[in-house]
Each structure stands twice: as structure tokens, then as C-alpha cells.
Image (cartoon, helix red, strand yellow):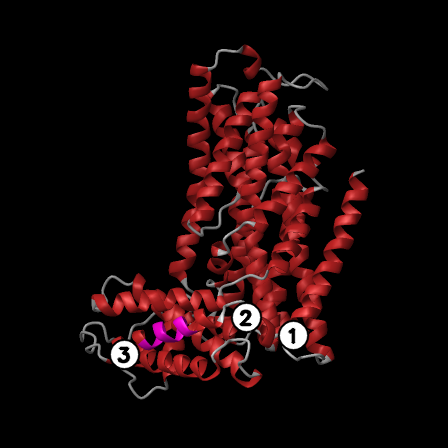
Amino acid sequence: MRLAVFLTMLVAGLVFTTYSLVRDVGRTGEHSMALLPFALLVIALVIALGFEFVNGFHDTANAVATVIYTNSLPPSIAVMWSGLFNFLGVLLSSGAVAFSIVSLLPVELILQVGSSAGFAMVFALLIAAIVWNLATWWLGLPASSSHTLIGSIVGVGIANALMRGRDVTSGAGGIDWGQVTTVGYSLLLSPIIGFGCAAALFVALKFCVRNPALYESPKPRTPPPWWIRGLLILTCTGVSFAHGSNDGQKGMGLIMLILVGTVPMAYALNHAMPDAQVAQFVATAQTAQRSLAAHPPLPDGVATAITATAPPRDALTAFVRTETLTADVVPALSVLTGDIAQEVASHGSFARMPATSVTNVRNDMYLAAESIRLLERRRDTAIAPDTARALHAFRAQLDEATKYIPFWVKVAVAIALGLGTMVGWRRIVVTVGERIGKKHLTYAQGASAEMVAMATIGAADLYGLPVSTTHVLSSGVAGTMTINGSGLQWDTIRNLLLAWALTLPAAIVLAGGLYWAFRQVF
């Protein structure tokens, strides 16, 4: 039955994805594509969906570990159930995580994602992430796909900076270390939260629920009492949904970069925005432009490197890349905002914008949105309150125009993640159930760890932060084992910590090396 469901979903996903892509491209009037860009598009999409497939059987095994290990559901039913809710989690996701991942990439590669360097970037970071995920899965180690992908992105950024002769330790290197730090904190703190909260919840459960059956190791081939079984299935469902809504978005952001680079007429701008909303976009841009034009010069202390003669796009590209605020940033943003408003107003709709303008307008929008984001993040910038409000409203409109995900992309990623969930789960399940603690996982421990993982991942999704399902759940199990006096198997804990510590440097080296190699080919 599971094989039939797997093959049916695979064929349905391929047919739906192909049909949707051909339809979207056809609507733009681009009825034919050159062979090389089309081949690169297909290869990039296959690799991106392959990453999500590996993510499914690598990370989602953690979601089904407790229900399988405690005999709450048979493995075949558990993985299909988890796959279904991973699917739903992806479909209902906000997209915030997808674009927080994309913002870690070097700005010049994002602006030229359809170039050879852009494809080298996408191929390098995805292949590096897949290789490391497969290696840790083969060893049965619950390593983090989120951790791996972020390490790969940093690796590409470092390699790109070194190849351009830049200092990677400073802002001039083009790596947004501030955003990397924010993401790093979420990856670092989430396991600590998982450990502490799962331990606290387990103590509360022992205090409130005195049923001894809840704290016994599962009996072979014997399901738990119905109410414990229901609780474990509920938490598995929640973790699967939360995992889909968070981890599924990482592939979405990269797929959108691929589509924007290869088929800009169809995907660079949000064609679903109605004309009335486009008119509102123009009005908001004009308000922001007038406010910027009337804004007094920034204080001398902020202007660290005045280059007032630089073209607006060059000035903002340098600002986004280095995060060095100069005196020409506000005037440049004013000019670029006016150019965007004028270009969009002249056509009245994103769908009617000519091919010659689409890529440039999208790049201008990206530069404007990132510049506003960096201005809002700085504490030392004396931006007038009225200007700040106008910029915030304009940035929201820019995000609406560019940071969108078509429904078919969500479906494709959801199917890839769901199919991955249906295979390869056994190695991780055994590690979570038997090899973290000296005693086998009990019903209460499994439920406590899963409930905390569900809440933590769901909260991270709301704030657009990528977290690791693997780290949160495995640390939650360790927390319940510790507080229960069950003891920890330090060989396993050491291996888990080793995988956690090695993932970033390994992914950085792999992705950086692959990027350098691909740049020699492309």
C-alpha cells in the first residue's frame, strides 16, 4: 500500500509541476526557451526538490520516532500520516522562513542569479547540503538539515568573497554576518529550549498524572493505553505539521531564486497582484520618495565613506553588501524609489511589464527592500519618524510584489518532503528511541519531547526563524532522560554533539569547494 501511495504521489507531483511551469511560462509569451537555460532550470529544480526529499527522510524521522517506537502506530501508517501533515504544513506556511534564508546569500549573486555564477551558487549549496545529510543519515545521526543548508550558504558566501579578493571577516566581504548571527542564535538556543522545557514538562506530567503505565518502557508489539496513544499521535501530528511549515520553506526560497533567474517574465514579480493593488504600490512608493527627497542629510558621524557621485544602484549595492552607511544612501534610495514608481506606473500592472524591464525592476525592488531593512535595523540612524513610517509601508509593498511563492511550488516541495518522510526513517527512530538514554524511551518522555518540539518549531515559524527539528526533539528526549534519572548514553550524546559541531564547518568547506569548482566550469 505504501509503495502504491508513494508512486501515485510521485507521478501526480511530476505531472502537476510540469503543467504549472509550462502554463506560467506560456502566459508570459515566452513559448520557447534556449536549450541551456531550460536544462539548467530542470537540473536546479531536481536538485532543490531532491534536497527536500532527503530532508523528509532525514529530519521527519524524528517526528515519527516516538509513535513508532511506542507502538502507537505501525511504521507504514505512521510515515504516511506524518508525510500528510508535512504536506499540509508546507501548503499553509507563511513564506517568511524562505526569504530569511535567501537574505543570507551574497547580494551580487542574488542580483545575477540567472548568470553562471548564480547557478554555480545554487548547485553548490544544495549538493553540499544533500551530501552531508546523506552521510549523517547513513551513520544514524540526527543532524540538522537547517544547520547544513545555512552552513552551505555561508560557505558559498566565503568562497565568493575570497575569489573576489575581499576580507571575509569584515562587512566588505559581502556576507551578512548580522543575519547569520540571528539565524545562528535560533539554531543554538532551540536545542537548549528543547532540553529545558521538555524536562520541565515531564516533571509536571509526573506530578499531575500518576498512572504508572505512562512511565514504563513500551512493551514489544503492544500499543499503549488509548489515551496515551492519542496524545502521542497528536504530538507526532503537530511536529510533522510544524516541520513542514518551517523546513519546507527553505527549499521554496531557493526554488524561487532559480525561477526568477531563468524565467523572470513569469516569476520575477507577483502577477497575482490586481491592478488596484499595483496602483496602491505606486502611491506608496511616491510617498516614500517624496519623504526621502525632503529628508535632511544624515549626521556626520554616520557618514563613514562619502561617495556622493556613485550611481544610486551602485551606492545601494555597496550598502547592502557591506552594511556601511554612507551619506549617499538616502539620496540614492530616493532616486531608486522614484525610478521604481515611475516604471511600474507606466505599465499599470506587473503582468504587462515588458521583458526588458522586469529583471531590472525586480533587482531595484530587492535593493530598495534590503536597504530599508538595514536602515530599520540600525540604532544609530537619525531617520525622521514620518520617513521611517513611509519606508516601512513601502517595504511591505515591495515584499508583496517580490516575496511570494506560487501554489505549485508549495505543492512540489510538499510532495518531495512528504515522499521523503515515507522512506529511510528506521535509522533515526532507533537512535531517538534507544540510544540517547540508558533506558528505553517511555510514553511520557516521548510525549513531552514532541509537545515541546511542536511548540518551539511553530513559534519559530511565526517569527521567520529557521530551527532544527532534529536538535529540538533529540535534546528534548535527552532532557527527559536526565530529569528522570534514566542516564544518558554518552557515546551517542558525544556523536550527536560531534555531528552538531561538525555540520557547519563541513557544510562550509563542501559548499565553498563546490562553488569554486563550478565557477571553473560555468
Q: Amino acid at mark 2?
A: His
> Residue 256 is drawn in which quadrant?
bottom right
Instruction: Please name the residue that numbered disc 1 is placed on.
Output: 27
CB atoms of marks 2 and 1 within 8 Å: yes
**Element class at badge 1:** helix
> Is residue 435 visible in the rendered structure shown here?
no
The quadrant of the picture occupied by the C terminus is: bottom right
Of the pair 234 and 164, the residue shown nearer to us: 234
Instruction: Please name the residue that numbered disc 3 is placed on.
Output: 290
Instruction: Look at the image and give the residue range highlighted in magenta.
Output: 279-286
**Element class at badge 3:** helix
Instruction: Please name the residue that numbered disc 2 is placed on.
Output: 271
Main secondary structure along the magenta-highlighted residues: helix
Q: Residue at x 72, y 80 (%)?
A: 32
Q: Earlier in the sequence, mark 3 or mark 1?
A: 1
- Is 432 left, or right, of 487 in this rendering? right
Label number found at residue 356: none
Crowdedness near tag 3: few (<14), some (14–19) or many (≥20) residues, C-alpha within 10 Å: some
Instruction: Judge whether 173 appears above or below 426 on screen.
Output: below
